[in-house]
């Protein structure tokens, strides 16, 4: 009921923000895949709270425990279960929110749908749920790299109205991780950090845009009609908390071009593979990857939980004012970078297995 994703490479996440722990079960991971377990933990460290002055001060080690599916670090082909225990819960910080719905948060809609909710920390609506996705995505990344040399890398392109000038072809992980906002434009990153801090001091929040690039994507991923690759990528990243927009390739800017300007002309190659002069399609045509770089952008709204006083209603429908307490990110984007990478990797891993299953016999 909404907690599973994928067809052949399938994940199911579980747990609430202030429960005993959160985690994931991966079903369908191929056997005999030798995993770098430290790389899984490294991805969780990029996502965890309390990592810098511009993220929530909640202190969690987010140490992953792998409960099944491996033998000496090699996958068995059986379900892989991973869990991270919650240690720094503070449910008392959410007492006011137990009777007042946070504007633009999931409190009101969860209550209306289920008639009950884990309000402490947002429960399943909390970004803490994404721990399972990031852990599973770390395995998907390794699968893609070993099967096809595919790299998935994302970065912060814009914070509030501050937009970086970035050459995607020059971006590498070291440049993304060189600052706490995860923007490879180092000069703009300093301004972004100042902006997040200033807005946070006001008790407010801000949003922005993350760009994700897939290098050396396999040709042929994606299915016609309903399972187009960009459709599954859109669903994947739009399932992340706080997302409000998705673009691929030229995106909305492409609507300003004529067909003659927008079309990606095919060029002859020595090996007969597909290659285009431009990449307005963002690496996907007809819902199927063409081997060019896949480029997507994801819009994240300002964090809904803020300290500023806001008008709202309580669970009886009565008007009230809420000044949220607790520990919250003034901007979700720095920690959302590994989340976006994970969801993109999960889609590609799933479609890679589907492509091999349908078209790999001959």
Image (spheres, rainbow, N blue to C red):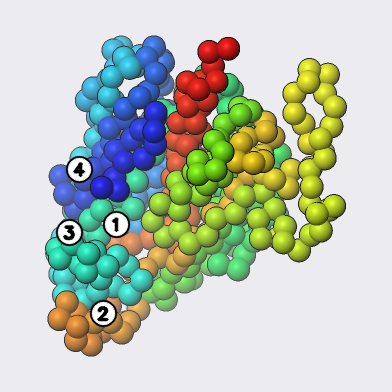
- In front: label 1 or label 2: 1
User: Relative to 101, does residue 290 appear above or below in the rendering?
Assistant: above
**Hey, which quadrant is residue 27 in on the image?**
top left
**Comes first in the chain, label 1 or label 3:** 3
Residue at 23% in and 87% down:
319
- In front: label 1 or label 4: 1
Q: Quadrant of the C terminus?
A: top right
Q: CA distance from mark 2 to mark 3?
A: 18 Å
Residue at 85% in and 52% down:
260
Location of mark 3 (residue): 118
Q: Secondary structure at mark 1?
A: helix
Location of mark 4 (residue): 21
| Nearest the eye: 186 or 299 | 299
Give the x, y percent position of residue 36: 41, 21
- In front: label 3 or label 4: 3
Q: CA distance from mark 1 to mark 2?
A: 19 Å
- Mark 3 closeness class: few <14, some 14–19, many ≥20 residues within 10 Å: some
Q: Are marks 2 and 3 in contact (CB under 8 Å)?
A: no
- Mark 4 closeness class: few <14, some 14–19, many ≥20 residues within 10 Å: some
Q: CA distance from mark 1 to mark 3?
A: 9 Å
**Comes first in the chain, label 1 or label 2:** 1
Location of mark 1 (residue): 125
Location of mark 2 (residue): 322
Give the x, y percent position of residue 113: 22, 64
**Comes first in the chain, label 1 or label 4:** 4
């Amino acid at each position: 009921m909404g907690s599973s994703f994928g067809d052949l490479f399938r994940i199911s996440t579980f747990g609430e923000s202030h429960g005993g722990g959160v985690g994931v079960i991966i079903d369908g991971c191929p056997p005999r895949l030798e995993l770098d377990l430290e790389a899984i933990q490294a991805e969780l460290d990029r996502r965890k709270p309390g990592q810098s002055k511009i993220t929530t001060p909640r202190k969690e080690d987010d140490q992953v425990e792998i409960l099944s599916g491996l033998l000496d670090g090699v996958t068995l082909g059986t379900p892989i279960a991973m869990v991270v225990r919650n240690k720094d819960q503070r449910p008392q910080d959410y007492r006011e929110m137990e009777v007042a719905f946070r504007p633009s948060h999931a409190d009101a809609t969860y209550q209306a749908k289920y008639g009950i909710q884990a309000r402490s920390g947002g429960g399943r609506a909390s970004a803490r749920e994404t721990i399972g996705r990031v852990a599973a995505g770390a395995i998907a990344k390794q699968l893609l790299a070993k099967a096809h040399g595919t790299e998935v890398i994302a970065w912060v392109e814009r914070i509030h109205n501050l937009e970086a000038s970035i050459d995607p072809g020059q971006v590498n992980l070291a440049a993304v991780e060189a600052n706490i906002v995860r923007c490879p434009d180092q000069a703009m990153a300093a301004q972004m950090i100042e902006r997040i801090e200033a807005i946070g001091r006001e008790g407010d929040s801000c949003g922005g845009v993350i760009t994700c690039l897939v290098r050396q994507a396999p040709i042929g991923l994606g299915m016609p009609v309903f399972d187009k690759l960009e459709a599954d990528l859109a669903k994947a990243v739009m399932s992340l908390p706080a997302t409000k927009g998705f673009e691929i390739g030229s995106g909305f800017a492409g609507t300003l071009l004529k067909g003659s300007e927008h079309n990606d002309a095919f060029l002859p190659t020595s090996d007969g593979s597909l290659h285009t002069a431009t990449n307005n399609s963002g690496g996907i045509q007809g819902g199927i990857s063409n081997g060019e770089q896949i480029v997507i952008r994801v819009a994240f709204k300002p964090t809904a939980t803020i300290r500023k006083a806001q008008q709202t209603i309580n669970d009886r429908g009565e008007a009230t004012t809420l000044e949220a307490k607790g520990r919250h990110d003034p901007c979700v984007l720095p920690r959302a970078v590994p989340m976006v990478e994970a969801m993109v990797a999960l889609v590609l891993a799933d479609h890679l297995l589907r492509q091999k299953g349908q078209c790999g016999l001959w």
